[in-house]
Image: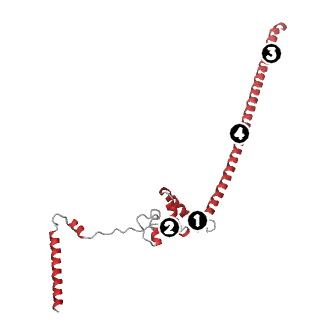
Amino acid sequence: MECGDHKTTTTISSMNSSSSTFASTISATPTSGLSPKRSILLSTPPMNIVLSPCAACKILRRRCVEKCVLAPYFPPTDPLKFTIAHRVFGASNIIKMLQELPEEQRVDAVNSMVYEANARIRDPVYGCAGAICQLQKQISELQAEFAKAQAEILNLKCQNSNLLALVCMEVSENSSSSLLLSSDHINDYENNNDNTSMFLEDNNLYGAWEPLWT
């Protein structure tokens, strides 16, 4: 019993000595030159910054590391993007394809995978090939319409040139007929002048012979 009491007394004395040492250490620390904000920062422990995981790691339920391959292309604000690509290609295939490409081509690769996955979900049989065939059909139809429009334009140009030729012929014929009419008028005028002069000469002769008969 005396041994137990001795151990308890020894433990309490050691605890008192350690607390007094800790108190003396704190009192020995110079805090007079520190501002209140600085003292608070020193007294509070540092907080760990928790970053939001990317959409891929969040859907896959795994820890998003600092150098995550999927984080730059599947942000946490757009989880549907990774959901669609993961549904068709799978996470391991997406990571493998991104690791095989240089960084400047990865954005286009991710956009292509998302587009192809959307097309595959809409059309499980043909997928992206069906959309390409539909676009090629539209291109061929537009090319046929363009060729038809070009043919119509060429036909209209030919008709316009023919009309211009007919107009020029009519104008030339009208000008030639007007010249003929003007020459006929000139000839008629000259004939009338000749007749008038002959009539005047006859009258003069008659007037010259008239005194002889009186």
Residue at (16% x, 74% y) in the render: 21
Give the amino acid type for the residue marked by disc 3 in the picture. Answer: Met
Please state which of residues 62 and 148 is positioned toward the viewer in this rendering. Answer: 62
Distance in Å between CA atoms under marks 3 and 1: 107 Å
Q: Which mark is residue 82?
A: 2
Pick whichever of labels 4 and 2 is earlier in the sequence. Answer: 2
- Tell me if 204 is positioned left or right of 26 in this view: right
Residue at (63% x, 68% y) in the render: 125
Percent coordinates x, y for residue 133 in the rendering: 64, 60
Distance in Å between CA atoms under marks 4 and 1: 52 Å
Pick whichever of labels 3 and 1 is earlier in the sequence. Answer: 1
Percent coordinates x, y for residue 108 in the rendering: 51, 58
Q: Which mark is residue 161?
A: 4
Give the amino acid type for the residue marked by disc 2 in the picture. Answer: Phe
In the rendered image, the vertical position of residue 10 relative to residue 144, given as above or below = below
Q: Which residue is mark 3?
A: 198
Q: Which mark is residue 119?
A: 1
Circle 3 SS class: helix
